[in-house]
Image: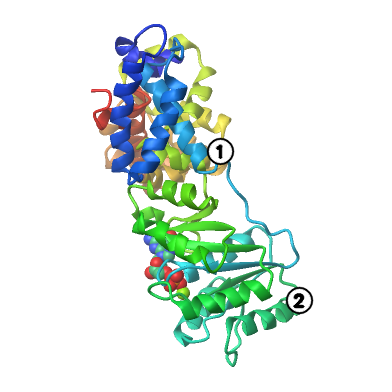
Amino acid sequence: LVDKFSGIFKKLRSKGKLSPQEVESILKELRMVLLESDVHYKVAKDLINRVKERAVGREVLESVTPGEMVIKILWDEIRKCLGGETQNLNISALPSFLLLVGLQGSGKTTTCAKLALRLKRQGHFPLLVSTDTRRPAAKEQLKTLAQNAQIDFFDEPDATSPLEVVKKARVFARQKSNDVVIVDTAGRLHVEEMLLAELRELVEQESFQETLLVLDATTGQEAVKVAKSFEEWVKPTGIILTKVDTDARGGAVLSIVSQTGWPVKLVGTGEKLEQIETFHPDRMASRILGLGDTLTLIEKIEKAIEKESEEKLVQKLKKEEITLNDFLDEIKRLRSVSSFEEIVGMLPGNLRSNLSMVDGEKNLKKVEAIICSMTPQERQNPSIINASRKKRIARGSGTSIQEVNKLLKQFEEFKKLWKQMHKGKFSPLRKRGIFG
Ligand code: GDP
Ligand code: MG
């Protein structure tokens, strides 16, 4: 089975141990990938050195190429550098107080609301608190977000300092039985002493389970400086990285974590309130290397495919093209290893949006019904499915023409993914010229 993906690399494979020259030449290419991803050159140098130590002299396994082997080691080092494991929020106290700090525009207010909604959906009773005593508009923003998401909101119009607001919020939270209190703070365009002095007073006199520094991912290396300057005033317990959806490169987070030692706990992935996710060092490592989340995905798919006889698989992959029958098989099999949603979440964005509808047991049944209502010819060659055929299929499967259309679109997307897998594990890297 493993041959399926690595067959293409067989030709380039050398035998025996990884030689220093081999490792050197692969790492030279990988160093470029790191720098292109906005990884600071010092961090990149460190990483490369560590990988060199681990890789040289290592036995090359039957099933992988030297290139793959070195990438895996580098991936592993990046993952470790990013903290290794995912880090959860400390909300064990009752109530837990979370303080969000950061520059203006970094996404604090939005993130406060996102976090509250996420916790609410997990069964908590969050309270949102605004402490921007100078800008009424800032309070309004949080208030509106809270109202829309039906989350408790507290503000003290007459208060003159954040400390005063938080003290009153504590009383309020006790009365209302809120178990998590999320405190939004004012931010200025740059690090301002007065504001930071206020913050320091706040963290010195009130206890917070988490002080989270909100950093805008799109500012790249600049975010490291911001983190450093905040450190002199408040000591964050973690980082929330926002706008990762608009940051194509992603490498700056390595500098941030390696220079501060603070774990990234959450990432913001869009403007909508639902768009906040747990930070996964392994997925981020894949992203920095330009693998998308393909590595994790491929591992899952490999596991899934193991169940199938090799022969059948080899046949299938030989043709490179898959039919709607195969599509149905694949969806079912993928679902047996992990939730489809999980797999879809690992796909590059464009594939993700088009495939996500197949999620859910009910939808899977629908997909099955639609495919079963097709003739063998239609399943083999969906391009012959014209309007009247669609009508017939929709009727036969108890669905609508729109649903038939959706399925056909998803199938097209799946074909693209299939082709990518067919070409081998590290095709994104090959595209970057690493494997020629
Ligand atoms: P604050 O000044 O730190 O409170 O920042 P805001 O919460 O007001 O956010 C500033 C801008 O960034 C707003 O337009 C938000 O919609 C946007 N924003 C926040 N988080 C994200 C994110 O994860 N992705 C994207 N694309 N935009 C975000
Ligand atoms: Mg704000």
User: What color scheme is it?
Assistant: rainbow
Q: Is residue 366 visible?
A: no
Q: Position of residue 429 (x, y in %)?
A: 31, 30
| Residue 30 x, y percent position in the rendering | 32, 31
Q: Which of 112 and 424 is in front in this view?
A: 112
Q: Quadrant of residue 385?
A: top left
Mark 1 close to ligand 1, CB under 8 Å: no
Q: Is residue 235 visible?
A: yes
Q: In which quarter of the image is residue 121?
A: bottom right
Select label 2 or label 1 by which is in front: 2
In the rendered image, residue 334, in percent from the top left (x then y), is placed at 51, 30
Q: Is mark 2 on a helix, strand or loop?
A: helix
Amino acid type, mark 2:
Arg
Q: Where is residue 105 in the image (x, y as percent from the top left)?
A: 40, 70
Name the N-terminal-most of marks 2 and 1: 2
Q: Name the residue located 56 percent from the left edge and 41 percent from the top edge.
A: 361
Indicate the quadrant containing the C terminus: top left, top right, bottom left or bottom right.
Answer: top left
CA neighbours of label 2 inside 10 A, class few (<14), some (14 to 19), many (20+): few
Badge 1: residue crowd in 10 Å (few <14, some 14–19, many ≥20): few
Q: In this view, does 389 lie to the left or right of 1?
A: left
Q: Which residue lies under the disc numbered 2?
A: 174
SS at mark 1 in the image: loop
* Location of ligand 1 given as a quarter of the image: bottom left
In the image, which disc is placed on residue 43?
A: none
User: Which quadrant of the figure has residue 48?
Assistant: top left
Q: Marks 2 and 1, Cα distance to the nearest angstrom?
A: 39 Å
On the picture, is 85 further left or further right than 36?
right
- Residue under numbered circle 1: 339
In the rendered view, tell whether residue 104 sits above or below residue 58: below
User: Does residue 197 sit above or below 318 in this rendering?
Assistant: below
Residue type for callout 1:
Ser
